[in-house]
Image (cartoon, helix red, strand yellow):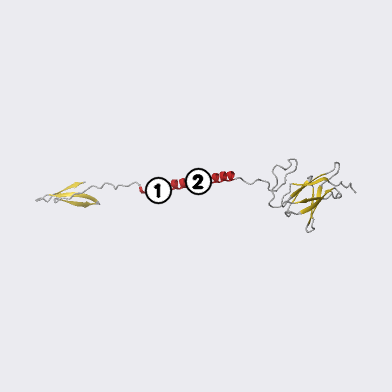
Amino acid sequence: MGVVPAAPVNVSVTQLRAHSAMVTWSVPQGDTVIGYAISQQRQDGLMQRFIREVNTSSHWCVLWDLDEDTHYSVQVQSVGLQDDSHPSRTIQFRTLERTDHYPAGVLDHHEPAMEGLDMTPQLQTGELLIITTVLLLWAAVIALFCRQYDIIKDNDSAGGGRDKNKRPSVRAPAVPYYHPSASSSPLYHNGSVHTGKLHRGSSSISIIRV
């Protein structure tokens, strides 16, 4: 059987909230630890939770879904290669009420951050005003772009219609104008048109080929 690791030391509860808290601890040097196990219990006995995580070197854990203004107790165990350590000493704490505010600047910068916990301060009125103004400007730019695009599109459509109306006119070829006179009459010979002039008192006909 392998060596059982020693129980965690310096167990403490920090960063209390109405519905969450952080548990931190230390591991004695020389122990081979591959994870941790935490036992969480309400002091009235109505709820008990057991958390176990392996393949980690973390020495902290965030407790979620706690009830506000409620007393809890926790114990931490180190998970070794073969077996778990004995439980640490019991730590008791009370969650805050919903109306309580965590004092600003109290957090220890050497403590690990509470991953996933919303610790971002609420946006101020000025920041909200700036964000709103930027969004409105973007909306105005987009609307202007769409309007200009519609105008260009309409102009292109109107220009295309004018080009279609301006088709080149084809002039019919000039046809010789024939003016008949009383003394002339058209003569047809082999599909050609000739003019003939008839002289009175004479039986001769002069043929003029056009």
Nearest the viewer among 127 and 206 is: 127
- Which amino acid, by three-letter code, is at mark 1? Ala
Q: Element at badge 2?
A: helix
**From this viewpoint, which residue is outermost toward the right?**
1
Q: Which picture quadrant has residue 121?
A: top right
Mark 1 closeness class: few <14, some 14–19, many ≥20 residues within 10 Å: few
Mark 2 closeness class: few <14, some 14–19, many ≥20 residues within 10 Å: few
**From this viewpoint, which residue is outermost toward the bottom?**
46
N-terminal of the pair, mark 1 or mark 2, is: 2
- The residue that mark 1 highlights is 158
Nearest the viewer among 52 and 107 is: 107
Asked if residue 38 can be seen in this view, the reply is: no
Task: Give me the C-alpha separation between circle 1 and circle 2.
Answer: 27 Å
Q: Position of residue 61 (x, y in %)?
A: 76, 48
Q: Position of residue 123 (x, y in %)?
A: 62, 46
Q: Position of residue 106 (x, y in %)?
A: 72, 43
Q: Element at badge 1?
A: helix
Nearest the viewer among 86 and 83 is: 86
Asked if residue 140 can be seen in this view, the reply is: yes
Q: Which mark is residue 140?
A: 2
Identify the residue shown where x is 59% and y is 44%.
127
- Which amino acid, by three-letter code, is at mark 2? Ala
Q: Position of residue 116 (x, y in %)?
A: 70, 48
Q: On the rendered structure, is 201 left or right of 77?
A: left
